[in-house]
Amino acid sequence: MIFDTDIFIWVQRGNSKAAALIDGAKDRYLSVQTYIELLQCATDKQQQRLVKRFISDFNFSVLPLTENIGHRALVYVEEYGLSSGMRAGDAINAATASENGMLLMTGNARHFKVVKELELKIFRP
């Protein structure tokens, strides 16, 4: 299962449901886009180290941005950006899940539900 950025944010805010969701997952993945977003939100080196330690301690695999993922993300922004508000980060996460044939866990159904080939699991805090 690929975890969207918002799930990590819920964990950082102390949401026990989000933490249990990650803890109970057998296989944990995130896109390189999510990893970048998490590091970008850190306000100092210590927070960056905490993010990196969390990803490592919970054995997350970071899925790279490939040419196919980039192309698919471009198609998603062009097709869904105006109608659903899909932005580049969401498009890359959706494309990463689609290209890898994986379920995407997110609390942000609005941006993703328009992608027909994307298998979603919606998180409700």
Image: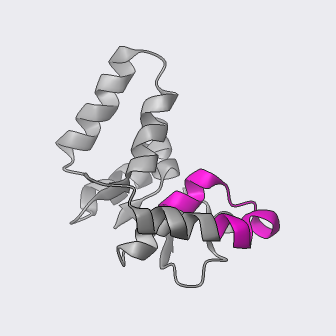
Is residue 16 something one can see in this rendering?
A: no
How far across and how far down the image is residue 75, in percent? Answer: 62, 71
In magenta, the rendered stretch is 76-93
Q: Position of residue 87 (x, y in %)?
A: 67, 55
Residue 59 x %, y %: 19, 50
Asked whether residue 69 is in view, the answer is: yes
- At 43% across and 69% down in the image, what residue appears? 68
Relative to 54, is 70 above or below? Answer: below
Residue occupying image coordinates x 34% and y 33%: 51
Of 62 and 67, the residue lying toward us: 67
In the picture, measured across the screen, residue 119 lies left or right of residue 20, that is right
Indicate the colouring scheme: one colour
- The residue sitting at 42% across, 63% down in the picture is 67
In the image, 25: left or right of 116?
left
Q: Is residue 42 above or below residue 124?
A: above
Q: Is residue 80 left or right of residue 102?
A: right
Q: Tell me what residue is drawn at x 58 percent, y 57 percent.
A: 90
Quadrant showing the N terminus: bottom left
Relative depth, front residue between 35 and 51: 35
Q: Position of residue 116 (x, y in %)?
A: 59, 84
Instruction: In the displayed orientation, state which residue is furthest to the right.
Output: 82
In terms of image quadrants, where is residue 101? bottom left
Q: Quadrant of the C terminus?
A: bottom right
> Closer to the camera, 3 or 34?
34
Compared to 34, does 75 lie above or below?
A: below
**Would you identify the image quadrant in which residue 20 lies?**
bottom left
| Relative to 78, residue 50 above or below | above
Is 80 colored magenta in this rendering? yes
